[in-house]
Image (cartoon, grey):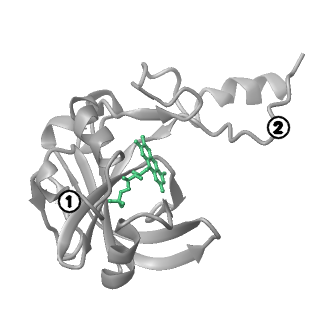
Amino acid sequence: MKKELKNTNGLYPSLTTLVGTVVEGKVNFLTIAHVGIMDMKQISVSLNKSHYSNAGIRQNKTFSVNIPCVDQVCKTDYCGLVSGKSVEKASVFSVFYGTLKTAPMIQECPVTMECRLVKTIDFPSHDVFIGEIAGTYCDEAILTDGKIDAGKLHPLLFVMHDTSYWTLGEPYAKAWDIGKRERKHRG
Ligand SMILES: Cc1cc2nc3c(=O)[nH]c(=O)nc-3n(C[C@H](O)[C@H](O)[C@H](O)COP(=O)(O)O)c2cc1C
């Protein structure tokens, strides 16, 4: 028996990220759970138009997407509680830059990406910024054979239904592999 939950967005958990911008010369970070993968090199962040960060992305045509780990939950939540309009958030984290000089990245985050703005989709309430990944920087400690190891990353997952941060569980099965059993079964 199914219960209809009107038009509830059921697409959670999603990954919790911190988006870095420079707004009027000031570094700013905000917390974003509405992130998307457009293709292997392009990602999207959906920002409510009321946020301070949007102007920085428009001004510089760059932004960063940083993946905090569980140790940074307090600072991550703080960046989603207060606005750069009234609070200075530059000193919350240590900042570094890659090739793009206006996409501040977070030293404490195990994975960071600097992005070049390629497209903005103008929704009534949100700006969806699509960025091409110009550089990805990872802590060596979370790599296995040179690849990001989700088991070492300890990302924060966000669930809107109970407004909680969750942690990642164990690997369950191999993709593009476990389904071969079904393929065999179906002949
Ligand atoms: C866990 C979490 C996830 C959030 N996800 C989003 C999001 O996907 N899009 C959005 O516009 N705001 C999101 N927010 C709210 C912004 O982070 C928050 O309003 C922030 O203060 C805006 O900062 P700014 O005004 O300095 O840009 C989220 C907040 C939290 C705590």
Say which residue label 2 marks: 6
Q: Which mark is residue 48?
A: none
Can I make out residue 86 in this image? Answer: yes
78 relative to 182 in the view: left or right: left
Q: Position of residue 137 (x, y in %)?
A: 21, 55
Residue at 79%, 22% in the rendered image = 185
Q: Nearer the viewer, residue 156 or 137?
A: 156
Rendered image quadrant of residue 160: top right
Q: Nearer the viewer, residue 125 or 157?
A: 125
Can I make out residue 144 in this image? Answer: no
Q: Is residue 176 above or below residue 67?
A: above
Q: Position of residue 180 (x, y in %)?
A: 67, 29
Under circle 1, the secondary element is strand
101 relative to 170 in the view: left or right: left
Q: Is residue 177 above or below residue 109?
A: above
Q: Position of residue 168 (x, y in %)?
A: 41, 25
Under circle 2, the secondary element is loop
Residue at 44%, 41% in the rendered image = 15
The three-letter code of the residue at mark 1 reads: Met
Q: Nearer the viewer, mark 1 or mark 2?
A: 2
Within-10-Å neighbours for mark 1: few <14, some 14–19, many 20+: many
Say which residue label 1 marks: 105
- Residue furthest right as drawn: 1
- Residue furthest bottom as drawn: 59
| Quarter in which the N terminus is drawn | top right
Q: Is residue 72 above or below residue 56?
A: above
The three-letter code of the residue at mark 2 reads: Lys
